[in-house]
Image (tube, rainbow, N blue to C red):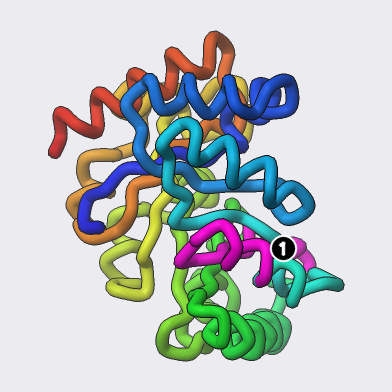
Amino acid sequence: MPGAISVQLYSIRNAMAEDMPAALQRTADLGFENVELYGYVDRVDAHREALAAAGLSAPSGHARLVVSDDVPGVLDASAALGMTTVIDPSIPEEQWATRELIEASAARLNEIAKQAADRGLEVGYHNHWWEVASVDGTPGLEIFAAALDEGVTLEVDTYWAEVGGVAAPDLLRRLGDKVTHIHVKDGPATRDTKAQLPAGQGVVPVADILAAAPNALRVVEFDDYDGDVFDGLAQSLAWLKAQA
């Protein structure tokens, strides 16, 4: 789906907790056709029904893999919802301190990818700011990427890459086709999540980011938003469509 657009449902977590069907319908009414799930593993039936009612597809979702104690359960839930890619949203910061620790995490994700393939799934990893910190002169995420097997992918959170001090467009170009998904968000590029803004309204070079990963699924996300998050999502979606 080159240039396709999705939205990470963590952005609307409060609305999802209050009324999942209504939240998903409102998301569809904004013009989204795809969503990225989170917190779905123990609510498969509820998600399946609400997604179908809203006419939404979920090509990807976030669920812990590397530090999970129930990888088969995660993979089964993901397959049941028709996903193509399960993305580990976070490996603890202390596991990015050395090359050996980073490569051990990559090796674990490679093992999980073999289990996922049996269910018709791919697996990937999503970064925060700590994964791009330099280890032996190289951003940790690039060490991680080099240790991943073919078919194990990355979802680069471009905002957190910028917060971590790495230019996201350059990072995307170096990682190349390993990146199949990107998180699109904007703001002042600080850790203050409340300050995040719709795409095109902050200091993050979002247009350059899109150009650097033309084939990646664009996943809009707000970690937090100081306003009506649905309005923020609508503004981001409109901006992305205008860029296309």
Q: Is residue 57 left or right of residue 207?
A: right
Task: Give 70 or 79, whichever is nearer the viewer.
Answer: 79
| Residue 195 point in image, percent of width and height | 55, 21
The furthest residue to the top: 227
Name the residue: 45% across, 73% down. Answer: 153
Callout 1, which amino acid?
A: Arg
Q: Is residue 126 magenta?
A: no
Residue 118 position by quadrant: bottom right
Give me the residue at 21% from left, 46% from top.
Answer: 208
In-front residue for pair 159/24:
24
Q: Which residue is mark 1?
A: 64
Residue 233 shows in the view: yes
Point out the stretch of residues depicted in magenta.
76-94
The reply, left or right, for residue 36 in relation to residue 215 is right
Above or below residue 220? Residue 123 is: below
- Secondary structure of the residue carrying tag 1 is loop
Q: Can residue 103 be seen in the rendering of this structure?
A: no
Q: Quadrant location of the N terminus?
A: bottom left
Q: Quadrant of the C terminus?
A: top left
- In the image, is residue 116 above or below residue 126? below
- Which residue is rendered at x = 29% and y = 54% of the image? 169
- Asked whether 77 falls inside the magenta stretch, the response is yes
